[in-house]
Image (cartoon, helix red, strand yellow):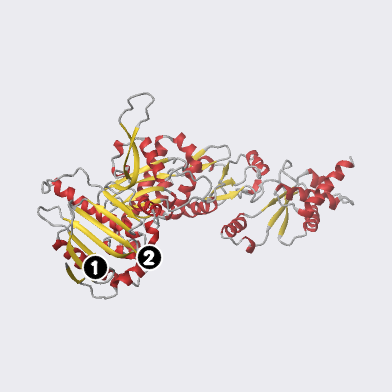
Amino acid sequence: MEKGKISVQTENIFPIIKKFLYSEQEIFLRELVSNAVDATTKLKTLANKGIFKGDLDDTSIEILLDREAKTLTIRDRGIGMTEEEVKKYLNQVAFSSAQEFLDKYKDEAGIIGHFGLGFYSAFMVASKVEVVTKSWQDGAGAVNWSCEGDPSYALATADKQDRGTDIVLHIAEDATEYLENARIEELLNKYCKFLPVPIKFGKTTETVGEPEGGDKEPETIEVDRIINNPHPIWKKKPAELTDEDYKSFYNELYPFSTPPMFWIHLKIDDPFNLTGILYFPRIKNSFEVQKNKIQLYSNQVYVTDNIKDIVPEFLTLLHGVIDSPDIPLNVSRSYLQGDANVRKITGYITRKVADSIHDLFKKDREQFHKQWEDLGAFVKYGMISEEKFYDRAVKFALLQNIGDEFFTIEEYKEKVKVQQTDKHDKIVLLYTNDKEGHHAYIASCKEMGYDVLLMDNVLDNHFMQHLEHQMGDLTFVRVDSDTVDNLVQKENTQESVLSEEENNQVKELFTKVVNNPGHQVVTKPLGANQPPVVIVRPEFMRRWKEMQMLQGAGGNDLFGDHLNVVINSNHPLIAQQLIQGGEGQEAMATYVYQLALLNQNLLKGEQLAGFVKQSLDLLGSK
């Protein structure tokens, strides 16, 4: 037996390794299985070149758990190592790479993955590591290398007949969770689910042969259980796949989930390599959707589901897989954000998603309209947050009016510009976020020939402001933000039937009734068929209040509860009764004011109870 010292500069490198990587301790299994895949792939390459002429019938990787011996073994049937290669790769290269990595990154937070550092990660969970290996080369003997977590090692011959490598981890006392079948299966499903080599773990039963008689039970045998899918569909060509293949794979990624609307197959070879499939879930009017559903792989090895540094924020609402060997994984997140390849990948995915949605829009617009309820939040989020996406999405983003008609933004501007252009030459897009609650306002708009949009998505407040900023020639106004005749800010053509003195008299009466310094009382000659009192909130103040509420500061409204109480001086009730005086004048003014409050859901508590009682009293007096 040969003994020696591993060529590292730091005597306590193993405690540093354990401490440095402890938060990601479970990564060890991904690293070791990935190394086994690499060894297997290299053997297949030698075989393809005609250098290796041996048996390739079984090139699977096997994970063996022995709770009694407290060992976890990763076994491959790859190229194996000679004694000289063991000395080179285990005693020199692996640990000198570990030393270099630690020296460079030990003070830097947020390391992504630890690719290429695979072997030494074993010491995060093992008090002793054994490597039993035999090279594919003719005449090579088997070797047993062992190390107990310090820079000393032992090297001896081994009794191993087959080529390949067994890495035997003697699990440490503080890592006994890795002696549980369920825990190992969890990690294999997480990190190794789509590795390109079959991985065996545990046993399953299979039915073999045909039963000879009708009453005889089928024969079953116990076989190794393959726990991964070595040929995921993102590695295949779209022409080879059916819709059912895509749906089945989605169910494999997210069991029991609602089926997606549609998907995009990504594939690019230059200037970087990337494949993947992105699925569009049904978002509707809610962002209560679990993000981190896009899984990042590197050559089918799982890396992370936290991809916010690789794709724009709005794309994290999608589900699926991205696989690229060109994303640097051994560096800090700050480096990743500035990496040229990552920026190219981000731009490519954004363009691909936008162009694919546009293709769907052009291919079947009627179907696109049906999907807009689910797709709209995603598109609006992208337009708000990503300029490159906005430039493409503005061609297919839809506006929906209360009649359930759909228009592109330019189509809608063309539809309403004649009737709804204000004195500043801006197109006024009238909207409601409460179709039922704003019924009276909407009805009045229709009477005047205006069209009304339905904007009730959680993002619409931001979306409208973004369109106003980007386009410059339009403005959004909610139907209850002003009186109907003034929504598009044209000159008022109505004349009041009241004299100036009578208008002042009405204003004085309602100011006394309203009795709120935050509510501004004005008289206005509206149409005789309009309500006697209309309560509106100025658009900019209402938007401010909504923004405050979205930011969780609803109680800190800068403008308070500011409302405009508009008295319709041309309504018969105002023009013929309230200017006549008498003891019932104030009660009548109070009643019509409270009717207006009720119409806005602003009449509550004691005021509401009093209003109901007064209404009953009026009915009883008839």
* Residue situated in front as seen by the camera: 301 or 445: 301
Residue annotated with mark 2: 173
Query: Please, is residue 16 above or below residue 374 in the view?
Result: below
What is the count of numbered marks? 2
Q: Quadrant of residue 543?
A: bottom right
Q: Point out residue 275 in the picture as x, y percentages from the top left corner.
A: 30, 47
Q: Which residue is at a point 14% across and 52% down the rendered structure image? A: 136
Which disc number belongs to residue 95? 1
Q: Which residue is at a point 13% across and 57% down the rendered structure image? A: 141
Q: Point out residue 125 in the picture as x, y percentages from the top left corner.
A: 34, 63
Q: Is residue 125 left or right of residue 36?
A: right
* Residue situated in front as seen by the camera: 205 or 118: 205
- Amino acid type, mark 1: Phe
Q: Is residue 187 left or right of residue 570?
A: left
**Could you tell me how far apart the alpha carbons at marks 1 and 2 are, in whole angstroms?**
24 Å
- Amino acid type, mark 2: Glu
Q: Residue furthest top?
A: 214
Q: Quadrant of residue 606?
A: bottom right
Q: Residues within 10 Å of mark 2 (few under 14, many from 20)?
A: few
First of labels 1, 2 by sequence position: 1
User: Of discs 1 and 2, which sits in the foreground?
Assistant: 2
The local secondary structure at tag 1 comes to helix
Query: Please, is residue 407 above or below residue 337 in the view?
Result: above
Q: Point out residue 315 in the picture as x, y percentages from the top left corner.
A: 41, 51
Q: Is residue 371 left or right of residue 84?
A: right
* Residue situated in front as seen by the camera: 604 or 297: 297
- The image quadrant where one finds the C terminus is top right
